[in-house]
Image (tube, rainbow, N blue to C red):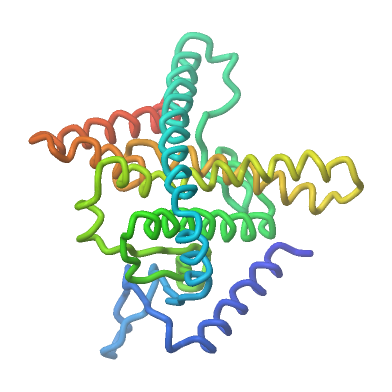
Amino acid sequence: MDELYIFGIFVLGVIIFGIINRKNIEIKPGIWIPIPFTKHKLPIIYMVLWHTTFGLKWLKKAVLRHKMFFRWVGSVSVFLAICAVIMTAYALIKNITDMILVPEMVTGTTVMLVLPFKTQTQMYVPIIYWLISIFVIAVVHEGGHAALAMAHRIPIKSAGLAFLCLGIPVIPAAFVQPDATVVPKKTKQQQLGFFSAGSGFNMVVGILFLGVFLLIRQYDVLWLSKLFFWLTLLNLGVGMFNVLPIFPLDGGHMVHAMVKESKKETLIVGVFSIFFLVLLASPYFL
């Protein structure tokens, strides 16, 4: 099926869905341009949020029934986050070193965007796999944050699906908005568990998807095999990237939670952010 045709179906579906659920839709302004000779503005870049409680009651019931398990998952997420940062930092530094010392041995950058169209410097994913993967990643990620918020009695003010729009809906996402006044009052361990839970869930689900991929690849189901390949790769990739200590990523919030009692918390968070941004950007300039 033509990829433009698939994207058109996606856009049309989102628009119809928005019209049907318009009472629960919120538009977050981004970049709007004025329409000549009128008082109206045309949205160019903006977010569309669909507020819903769908699934939250079931999740809360599960968390309250197995509260200790989910708190343990939060601790595991912190451990996975630390391991991911160390592995990513090593890979980035090694990649930069190889580019300088043995450039003929380097075939590409360690970190790159994953896009549903072909370019010379980015990873290409067929649009149907890209749309499904982004949706699954977002729901798993925000579900992780919601679960740990409930486990640590952090009120959730709002949750739902979101769409980044460039004139039309382009990228599906999800969101969980906790009570920002309660989070800083929790213990350091609880905050770290909450901030790392989204990426932790992504990495665990990615490992589970890897098992499914290895199982079904033995059978002649090529489409499903490719889907789980991308679900595995992108869940692991997004999970590892999002815990990098770069503000406002979850990893940046983790660093802030660890040093919030220091008088130099802003400086420390800034140093970590700049250091890892330099690591990420350097290969594109070498």
Query: Horizontal placement of 1 versus 60: left or right?
Result: right
Residue 11's quadrant in the figure? bottom right
Residue 97 position by quadrant: top left
Q: Residue at x 58, y 84 (%)?
A: 16
Asked if residue 6 lies left or right of residue 50, the reply is right
Residue nearest the viewer, comparing 244 with 280: 244
- In this view, the residue in front, 159 or 223, is 159
Give the x, y percent position of residue 271. Answer: 22, 31
Counting from the top left corner in percent of width and height, residue 238 is at 51, 44
* Quarter of the figure with the N terminus: bottom right
Instruction: Give the position of the C terminus as an image quadrant.
Output: top left
Against 265, residue 178 (above or below) is: below
The residue lying at 52 percent from left, 38 percent from top is 112
Residue 17: x %, y % from top left: 56, 82
Residue sticking out furthest to the top: 101
Give the answer, above or below, for where 171 lies relative to 22.
above
Residue 13, above or below 272: below
State how many labels appear. Answer: 0
**Residue occupying the far right of the picture:** 220
**Camera-nearest residue between 244 and 184:** 184
Residue 193: x and y in percent read: 37, 44
Q: Residue at x 63, y 40 (%)?
A: 207
